[in-house]
Image (cartoon, rainbow, N blue to C red):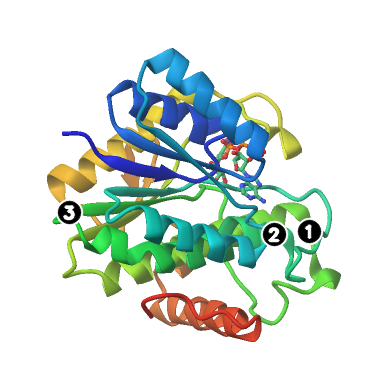
Amino acid sequence: MSKRILITGATDGIGKAFAKYMASKGHHVIIHGRNREKVKDSALEIIKKTKNKKIDTIVADFASLTEVQSMSKSLLGKYNFLDILINNAAVIAPEYIESVDKIELTFQVNYLSPFLLTLNVLPLLKSKQRSQIINIASIAHAETINFNTILDPEFFDSYSAYEISKLCNILFTYKLAKKLQNKKITVNCLHPGVISTKLLHVLWSGGAPVKNAVEAIKNVMIQAEKNFETGKFFAGKSLVLSSAISYDENTQQKIWDFSMNLLKLKGIIPGNF
Ligand SMILES: NC(=O)c1ccc[n+]([C@@H]2O[C@H](COP(=O)([O-])OP(=O)(O)OC[C@H]3O[C@@H](n4cnc5c(N)ncnc54)[C@H](OP(=O)(O)O)[C@@H]3O)[C@@H](O)[C@H]2O)c1
């Protein structure tokens, strides 16, 4: 049966490869990106390759909370359901950069904006009998988190900021999975593998082909659909454990409150919570 799937950061790397795969299977794919031209080109390329015309596009720079709010409003206005949300968009900022909201870029793009988007579009996921959220995290996630310094420029380090953002993806996954336990929405996260993309090449080289990541995401989708797995972390095709701190309920609550307070400070109350 055809599903409607929103993939953030579907203009390059893993997100684009997965959008292509889902389109090739006849699903309705909503391609998100930050660059209007690149979003349009990606959609045209996918339509041409897959002959699937059920491809929509949406543009929002995750470095702007206002753009995430507009994106959410457009989605809620245009669609009455979503089967799958894949939070995939991410960056590794090579140096300390502030978003337009004056928040460190990696934290905002990789974690805070997806947090806001997800809470905003929950009504679309709730309107289905079964739906799922997949957060693309990483095996490269932090083992500790200091809430006093995560956004402090003095403590900035490119790799640590990325690791922290990926830990936040996992903490959010576990917390949301618990909150949604009876609502038939599964929430899982995964490490897609070490994949040759421009994000990887900011700090490293090499990497496996994107098709490996496509297989890994497909596996999570199937595990959630068939076995109703939720609140889990996968690496490649295996169910694995994430860092000990990611299971700490106090830390899960703390990052939730930290995010809510930060959004409130910027005048934003996410939908539904
Ligand atoms: N590659 C790996 O080895 C690896 C390993 C573990 C986890 N991951 C995770 O896999 C996911 C996909 O990464 P990738 O490796 O495929 O990277 P990628 O090829 O660089 O793709 C990243 C996507 O995110 C989008 N994006 C970046 N900044 C954005 C912003 N400000 N607003 C909106 N969208 C933005 C990019 O848009 P543009 O096309 O405009 O740049 C692109 O579509 C990420 O969550 C990453 O953390 C990757």
Residue depth check, mark 1 versus mark 3: number of the one nearer the observer: 3
Label 3 neighbourhood size at 10 Å, few (<14), some (14-19), many (20+)?
some
What residue sits 66% from the left and 33% below the top? 37
Q: The C terminus lies in which quarter of the figure?
A: bottom left
Badge 3 marks a residue whose secondary structure is loop
Say the numbered circle drawn on residue 157.
1
Residue at 59%, 56% (x, y): give it. Answer: 110
Viewer-closest of 90 and 216: 90
The image shows residue 144, relative to residue 50, as above or below, that is below
Which amino acid lies under the numbered mark 1 shown in the image of this protein?
A: Asp
Task: Name which quarter of the figure residue 163 lies in.
Answer: bottom right
Which labelled disc corresponds to residue 130? Answer: 3
* Residue 5 as seen in the image, left or right of residue 223: right
Look at discs 3 and 2 and give the one toward the viewer.
3
Q: CA distance from mark 1 to mark 3?
A: 40 Å
> Hey, what amino acid is under mark 3?
Arg
Per the model, the C-alpha gap separating discs 1 and 2 is 6 Å
For marks 3 and 2, give the CA distance. 34 Å
Viewer-side residue, 124 vs 173: 124
Reply above or below: 90 against 184: above
Q: Which mark is residue 246?
A: none
Q: Nearer the viewer, residue 27 or 234?
A: 27
Apparent side of residue 185 relative to residue 172 in the rendered image (left or right): left
Q: In the image, residue 7 lies at what x, y percent? A: 44, 43
User: Please, what is the three-letter code of the amino acid marked with disc 2?
Assistant: Ala
**Where does residue 139 sit, x and y in percent of width and height?**
51, 47
Q: Which residue is mark 2?
A: 161
Does the residue at mark 1 contact the one at mark 2 (Cβ under 8 Å)?
yes
Q: Horizontal and vertical percent for residue 144?
A: 59, 69
